Image (spheres, rainbow, N blue to C red):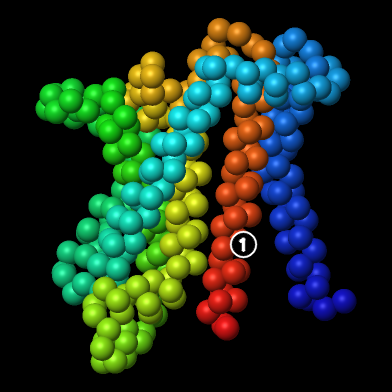
Amino acid sequence: MSDAARLSWPIKIGAAMALIVLLLPVVIVVLAGLNAGDYLTFPPQGLSLRWVIAFIQSETFFDAYLFSLELAAITMVISTIIGTMASVYLARTRFGGAKAMRGLFMSPIVLPGIVLGIALYVFYVSTDIGLARTFTGLLIGHVLVTCPFVIATVTASLVGFDPSLEEAARSLGAGPLQAFRLVTLKIISPAVSAGSIFAFIISFGQFDLSLYLGAQNLTGLPYAMYISLRYKFEPTAAAAGIFAIVLVVLSMVLSSRLINLRKLVARA
């Protein structure tokens, strides 16, 4: 057995253990949501769709789920547009402060969500601009949190990008926007798609901002689950987690399919 083969076994074992650690909480949530008992326990007291049906019929949970979907979808669109524009600018600019600007754009990733939520809430209240406890104020917070992920993925795809391709399109009569849309955007579209999916997933699961910027009529699913578990320990919250997990898996599968489809179209 070669040295490379001997080294590969510890790596495979470590990867398998890491995968188990990552998937174990998901399995526990799914089984807890399918519990046939009256309380949130693990192992479950039998399997049943009782609490899944209760989640669908619950106005509190299902309305919160739909609100999270709406907010995440709008956040994804705005963050994708702003993040892509910022990435193109940072990749092409010769401005000396571009590195500092990139660090400023990426700072929401480093800052804890609680700190950002408090900062935005204090800013909204102290400036009296009417954004405290509003959908617009909550949306701004979600865009601030998710935009750096779009910038990171799109900027990585622009590293090593040959600007002569876009210049060739310009020389053939295409305008600046047309050349960007037909050449640059097609090349970086897999990264844009990946960044948008990241933005959607992160926005959907955002809790810290909702804690400070949300309101009674602006309650997302993570916050609704938190409130429910404070007062009653029933498996409805775990059933809500099943729907959240399914949504994340579908988003990742859709992103992978879109990226593969675009690669096939580009090759054709």
Q: Quadrant of residue 50?
A: top right
Q: In the depicted view, which residue is nearer to us: 202 or 219?
A: 219
Locate residue 217 relative to residue 43 in the image: left or right: left
The residue sitting at 52% across, 17% down in the picture is 60
* Residue at position x 44%, y 36% in the image: 70
Residue farthest top in this picture: 231
| Position of residue 199 in the picture relative to residue 101 (left or right) | right
Against 112, is 5 above or below? below
Q: Is residue 143 visible?
A: yes
Vertical position of residue 178 compared to residue 254: above or below: below
Query: Is 210 on the left-hand or right-hand side of 10?
Result: left
- Sort mark 1 into few (<14), some (14-19) or many (20+) by Cα contacts within 10 Å: few
The spot of residue 249 in percent (x, y) is 64, 46
In the rendered structure, the answer to whether residue 170 lies left or right of residue 222 reads: left
Disc 1 element = helix
**Whole-percent x and y of residue 165?**
35, 87
Relative image position of residue 262 (x, y in whole percent): 54, 71
Report x, y in % for residue 231. 56, 7
Residue 222 seen in the figure = no
- The quadrant in which residue 37 appears is top right
Res. 30 image quadrant: top right
Residue at x-position 78% and y-position 76%: 3
Q: Quadrant of the N terminus?
A: bottom right
In the image, 224 versus 67, the foreground residue is 67
Q: Amino acid at mark 1?
A: Arg
The C terminus - image quarter: bottom right
Name the residue nearer the viewer: 148 or 37.
37
Residue position for label 1: 257
- 190 or 14: which is nearer to us? 190
